[in-house]
Image (cartoon, rainbow, N blue to C red):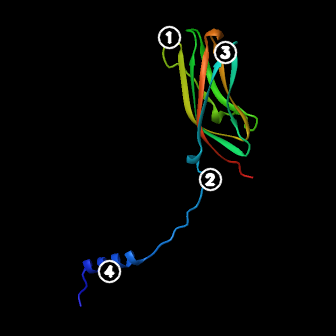
């Protein structure tokens, strides 16, 4: 008896159609796509130096994971902004969440910077900090925005 390739494939398809499979759904409460978040704030400078603004308050029992920070600033023509960063009482500022804010346009008053970060903070306030290096403070301001997600705090 001669068995052809078509016959073998037909038998395999028939067996697969009769096989039953069962799946057990698994609930993943820490999936980043379940609790995405964004936040932003604006710093209006009153002096040269470090300006801060409150970005977000992490709820009790949660952990904030920031994955991107963006800083956009407006100053007078003599102004310059050096950097922006994130800080909280449970996560110290570090080079990992530092973003340079170079002037993007020659002889213009706009500067911006953005980068991917790995910033984690437990319950409590998270602040944005930006350093105004030069310029007229009363005409200088920066907008800071973050994107990330909230997950349950692991015990």
Residue 46 x, y percent position in the rendering: 69, 12
**Few, some or many residues within 10 Å of mark 2 (<14, 14–19, 20+):** few
**Few, some or many residues within 10 Å of mark 4 (<14, 14–19, 20+):** few
Residue at point 57%, 9% (across, down): 76
In front of the other: label 2 or label 4?
2
Q: Is residue 128 left or right of residue 32?
A: right
Residue at point 66%, 20% (across, down): 131
Query: Mark on residue 45?
Result: 3
The quadrant in which residue 17 appears is bottom left
Cα separation, mark 3 vs mark 4, equals: 76 Å
Cα separation, mark 1 vs mark 4, equals: 75 Å
Give the mark nearer the N terminus: 1 vs 2: 2
Residue 127 x, y percent position in the rendering: 69, 29
Q: Which residue is mark 2?
A: 29
**Few, some or many residues within 10 Å of mark 1 (<14, 14–19, 20+):** few
Q: Which residue is mark 1?
A: 107
Give the mark nearer the N terminus: 2 vs 4: 4
Residue at point 61%, 13% (across, down): 140
Is 35 above or below relative to 85?
below
Q: Is disc 3 placed on a helix, strand or loop?
A: loop
Q: Which residue is mark 4?
A: 11
Residue 23 x, y percent position in the rendering: 52, 68
The quadrant in which residue 119 appears is top right
Is 7 above or below relative to 119?
below
Is 118 above or below relative to 20?
above
Residue at point 56%, 33% (across, down): 115
Give the mark nearer the N terminus: 2 vs 3: 2
The quadrant in which residue 116 appears is top right
Cα separation, mark 2 vs mark 4, equals: 42 Å
In front of the other: label 3 or label 1?
3
Give the mark nearer the N terminus: 3 vs 4: 4
């Amino acid at each position: 008896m001669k068995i052809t390739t078509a016959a073998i494939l037909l038998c395999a398809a028939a067996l697969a159609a009769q096989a039953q499979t069962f799946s057990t759904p698994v609930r993943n409460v820490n999936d980043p796509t379940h609790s995405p978040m964004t936040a932003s704030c604006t710093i209006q400078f009153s002096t040269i130096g470090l300006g801060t603004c409150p970005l977000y308050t992490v709820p009790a029992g949660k952990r904030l994971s920031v994955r991107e920070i963006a800083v956009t600033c407006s100053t007078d023509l003599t102004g310059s902004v050096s950097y922006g960063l994130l800080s909280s009482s449970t996560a110290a500022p570090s080079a990992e969440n530092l973003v340079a804010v170079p002037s993007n346009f020659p002889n213009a008053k706009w500067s911006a910077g953005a980068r991917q970060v790995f910033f984690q903070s437990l319950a409590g306030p998270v602040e944005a900090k930006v350093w105004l290096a030069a310029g007229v403070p009363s005409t200088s301001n920066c907008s800071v925005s973050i994107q990330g997600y909230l997950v349950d705090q692991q015990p």
